[in-house]
Amino acid sequence: MNSTSLTKSLILILVLISTISSCGPDKNSSKSMEKGIVPVAYDLPQIIDNGVLRVITTYSPTGYFIYKGQTMGFEYELFKRLADHLHVGLEVVLARNVDSVIPMLNRGEGDIIALGYTITSDRKELVDFTEPYLITHQALVQKKPDNWRKMTLDQIDKTLIQDVTELIGDTISVRKNSSYYRRVKELSNELGGKVHINILPGSMSDEEIIQKVAMGEIRYSVIDYNKAAIHKSYFPVIDVSTPISLSQRIGWAVRKTSPELLNTINQGLVEIKSKPDYNVIYRKYFENRKYFNRRLDSEYYTGVTGKFSKYDEMVKKYSKDLGWDWILVKSLIYQESMFRNNRKSWSGAEGLMQLMPTTAEELGVKDLNDPEQNIKAGSLYLKRMHGYWEQIPDSIQRIKFAMASYNCGYGHIRDAQRLAQKYGKDSLSWDNGVDFYVKNLSNPKYFNDPIVQHGYARGSEPYDYVRDIFERYRNYKTIATSL
């Protein structure tokens, strides 16, 4: 190592070590965001009782997104596992401004903040953090010269900030209520020289900031390294090799009034991290560069393009006559075929809406693998099922009865309704009523009951079918309404 490199390394080490003894909380910390908001009293028993876990997050190409109709993301895969472990549904609450997530949590708009949130002392005054599930560090995001491909690595390095002392007198652009803002303030103090801060809107995502650096609209910014590094594959013009902080812990946040939920999450994270698939999930979203680039270039990266599949216009067309939200029908089609037009099930159902050949023939379908014929016929069949349940007063409950009938047949759902009547449950409600008896049509106690006319059914299938479609629908709607 030459003397210049050694000097730079020593300076960087001193800067990083000084982070440990940095001064107290910044007056402009997130504390000011939460003034006057008393956290609602809402903990795990209430979540279990209501049957829904509400997670506050942001749309991002690593944490939570929809791609080709599939809800995905590193954070999403973790909190989906948590909801499944708790045997509750999942509702994603999309924050349009990251500055607002702590107030949203404490007002009771969600139960968890899960968006790659850095654990800081300021935030710990307002919320409780889970045990960390990621360790990363903050990196300086900067742009290489326009002609960098024609330069040697040494030539490129000479144009870049490689030593944080070179930032004195320069400007870094960050969001004010981010951990990045506080770190730049600390850095300015540690260096004994002013590093100016350009405040970015809280509505601007890390991904948008990285893009602005790549486009030359922002000179420097700071982003967590794991996010910045995967974006470097899509924007090779950026450099993220200069660290700005020591290692930092990433966790989820809950209200201080939710100790039982916190304990349960911590237990769940320990279990999740102990399994091999945790590393598989991490690599999928933060290390698989080809997949990341293909996703961002796709016209079916829904949060950017608004498209779910190449069949969107057909679904809109035939959903009008059915009278359902086309996005709900889209969610059902994904459940049936994952938008794979040539899909054929073990039972012989075919096409996008998985029609049985006899049903298709009755509805005038000539070619089950023709997308438009399949969607048209499937929508007609859904309309028929919907018509069987005119006695259901609530429109959403009626749709759920129709969906379940589409999945396993009207007769089985009618049997479950009779069982609900017999046992004193609400026979006109799917939720917490008929759904229980549908699920138990594989139980001899119920399918052998004299009032059951159609016998045994794999009741968990229609039960899961309806639940999964509506959970996906909520995700679809969350993204669609944010565009």
Image (cartoon, grey):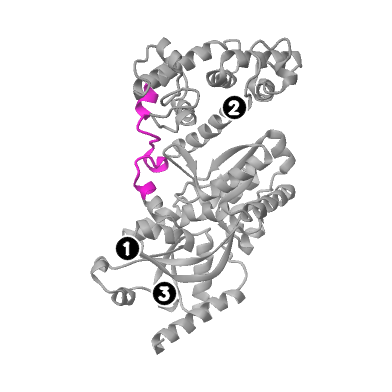
Query: In the image shown, does 271 or 192 lie closer to the viewer?
Result: 271
Instruction: Between label 2 and label 3, give the one nearer the viewer.
Output: 2
Instruction: Between label 2 and label 1, give the one nearer the viewer.
Output: 2
The answer to whether the residues at label 1 and label 3 have Cβ atoms under 8 Å apart is no
* Residue carrying label 1: 237
Residue 215 % position (x, y): 31, 58
Query: In the image shown, does 28 or 471 lie closer to the viewer?
Result: 471
The C terminus, quarter of image: top left
Q: Is residue 41 left or right of residue 78?
A: right
Residue 177 % position (x, y): 53, 58
Vertical arrangement, residue 389 with respect to residue 335, above or below: above
Vertical arrangement, residue 45 with respect to residue 283, above or below: above
* Residue carrying label 3: 167
* Callout 1 crowding tier (Cα within 10 Å): few <14, some 14–19, many ≥20: some
The N terminus, quarter of image: bottom left
The answer to whether the residues at label 2 and label 1 have Cβ atoms under 8 Å apart is no
Residue, far bottom: 3
Query: Amino acid under label 1?
Result: Val
Whether residue 112 appears in this view of the structure is yes
Secondary structure at numbered mark 3: helix
* Residue carrying label 2: 461
